[in-house]
Image (spheres, helix red, strand yellow):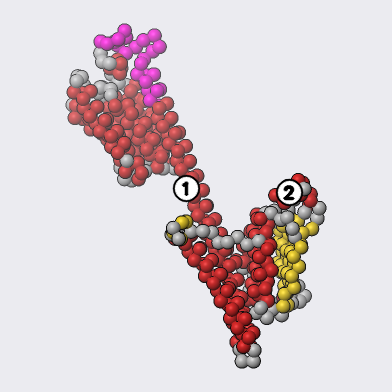
């Protein structure tokens, strides 16, 4: 309704009804004072510009318009008062809050038109046309005009309700898009920055441990910290730029770089330089890009959890493609020899990282299993590849 009130069109409707009612009654011979008829017309159309619309205003408008007709005032722009009010309020209010009042308003205005003492005046005034008394071979003209008025009111209400539903659906889609973008950004920050901080903490601890007896090893740890912190800061800047919709180097803020299977060895090596022994098996080719990104995210989050929670000395990372072309899948496994089943109930609760990984994998039709073993913790994701771009490529080979 606020958008309607800020527009000039509703005010134009009020002016047209007011001036038109004044002019039509001034040129005719109404049964009552002209001022009363003009006031009835004004009150009938006024709800279109009121700040706080209420459903009962439709019934009030119908009562004023019906009284106008029943009192014998001249026809004119008053015909569009109730349809316009119904349209404006139906566009602003839920259907349940106005439809009952619209029925009352339509009944009142139709009764006023039928009770009009000079129905012929709807056809241009008394004495004009072949049926100057307002009646013809089809019956009372005012009765048919009342039916037409009711139909017009119903049509205006239906159109406004459809527009309102469309606007609400659009707003809901926009809210969902904003929410999805926030979740995506939070996941990217957790996966990227969270992993980077975990690696930095591990490298710093390793550097402190060997600082006195092996300065060269400490240097390697510090170099790894510098590289990891730079990557994490770059990711953080990109996400903040997207969040604030700022410009970066004259263009739109770019998305975070998309990692794939080719980046997994470098990821493992960064973690390995901190002292955690990691064995890597990477045996997956011709994998769709979306599956590659999901696999990288699973490995990254798995290693982050090993660093933060497991207290492990060794981890195994495996990315293997299995099955034939019609039932191919990629299995990603991260296993460690840490605390595993000794973890407390609070630590074993799935956090944001596992929830984010599960959503990525399930979006591709896969499954994710995460849980402790007798010794250590295992993370296993199964991502189907059949029917994807990879499968199509094999079919062409």
Q: Nearer the viewer, residue 259 or 90?
A: 259
Q: Which mark is residue 8?
A: none
For residue 180, above or below residue 226: above
Residues 195 and 127: in front is 195
Can residue 392 be seen here? The reply is yes
Q: Which residue is mark 2?
A: 393
Residue neighbourhood size for the residue with mark 1, other residues' Cα within 10 Å, grouped as few (<14), some (14–19), many (≥20): few
Measured as percent of width and height from the top left, residue 248 is found at 46, 60
Q: Which label sits in the foreground, 2 or 1?
A: 2
Depth check: 114 or 299 in front? 299
Q: Is residue 100 left or right of residue 341?
A: left
**Residue 375, horizontal then vertical, whole percent:** 76, 76
Which corner quadrant of the image does residue 363 belong to? bottom right
Name the quarter where the N terminus is drawn: top left
Vertical comparison of 379 with 359: above or below: below
310 up-or-down from 356: above or below: below
Task: Determine the residue positioned at 32% across, 40% down.
Answer: 7
Q: Is residue 302 visible?
A: no
Disc 1 secondary structure class: helix
Please say if 221 is above or below 70: below
Q: Position of residue 57 (x, y in %)?
A: 34, 38
143 magenta-colored: yes
- Judge left or right: residue 318 versus residue 297: right
Which residue is rendered at x = 40% and y = 42% of the image?
A: 92
* The image quarter in which residue 338 lies: bottom right
Disc assigned to residue 171: 1
* Tag 2 secondary structure: helix
Query: Of all residues shown, which one is farthest toward the bottom?
Result: 212
Q: Is tag 2's residue or tag 1's residue first in the polypeptide sequence?
A: 1
Q: Which residues are magenta?
A: 127-150
């Amino acid at each position: 309704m606020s958008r309607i009130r800020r527009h000039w069109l509703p005010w134009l409707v009020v002016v047209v009804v007011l001036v038109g009612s004044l002019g039509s009654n001034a040129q005719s011979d109404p049964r009552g004072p002209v001022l009363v008829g003009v006031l009835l017309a004004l009150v009938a159309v006024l709800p279109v510009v009121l700040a706080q619309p209420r459903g009962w205003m439709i019934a009030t408008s119908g009562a004023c318009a019906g009284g106008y007709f029943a009192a014998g005032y001249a026809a004119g722009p008053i015909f569009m008062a109730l349809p316009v009010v119904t349209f404006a309020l139906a566009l602003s209010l839920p259907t349940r809050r106005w439809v009952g009042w619209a029925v009352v308003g339509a009944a009142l205005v139709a009764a006023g038109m039928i009770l009009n003492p000079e129905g012929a005046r709807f056809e241009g005034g008394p004495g004009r046309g072949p049926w100057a008394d307002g009646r013809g071979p089809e019956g009372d003209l005012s009765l048919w005009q009342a039916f037409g008025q009711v139909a017009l009111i119903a049509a205006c209400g239906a159109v406004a309700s459809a527009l309102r539903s469309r606007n609400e659906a659009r707003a809901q889609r926009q809210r969902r898009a904003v929410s999805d973008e926030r979740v995506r950004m939070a996941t990217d920050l957790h996966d990227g920055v969270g992993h980077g901080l975990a690696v930095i903490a591990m490298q710093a601890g390793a550097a402190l441990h060997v600082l006195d007896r092996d300065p060269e090893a400490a240097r390697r740890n510090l170099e790894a910290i510098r590289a990891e912190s730079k990557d994490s800061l770059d990711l953080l800047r990109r996400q903040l730029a997207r969040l604030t919709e700022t410009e970066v180097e004259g263009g739109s803020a770019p998305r975070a770089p998309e990692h794939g299977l080719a980046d997994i060895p470098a990821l493992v090596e960064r973690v390995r330089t901190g002292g955690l022994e990691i064995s890597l098996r990477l045996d997956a080719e011709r994998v769709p890009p979306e599956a590659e990104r999901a696999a990288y995210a699973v490995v990254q989050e798995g290693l982050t959890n090993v660093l933060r929670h497991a207290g492990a000395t060794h981890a195994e990372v495996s990315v293997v493609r299995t099955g034939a072309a019609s039932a191919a899948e990629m299995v990603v496994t991260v296993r460690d020899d840490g605390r595993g089943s000794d973890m407390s109930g609070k630590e074993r609760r799935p956090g944001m990282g596992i929830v984010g990984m599960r959503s990525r994998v399930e979006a591709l039709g896969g499954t994710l299993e995460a849980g402790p073993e007798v010794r250590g913790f295992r993370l296993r994701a199964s991502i189907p590849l059949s029917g994807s771009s990879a499968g199509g490529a094999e079919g062409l080979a």
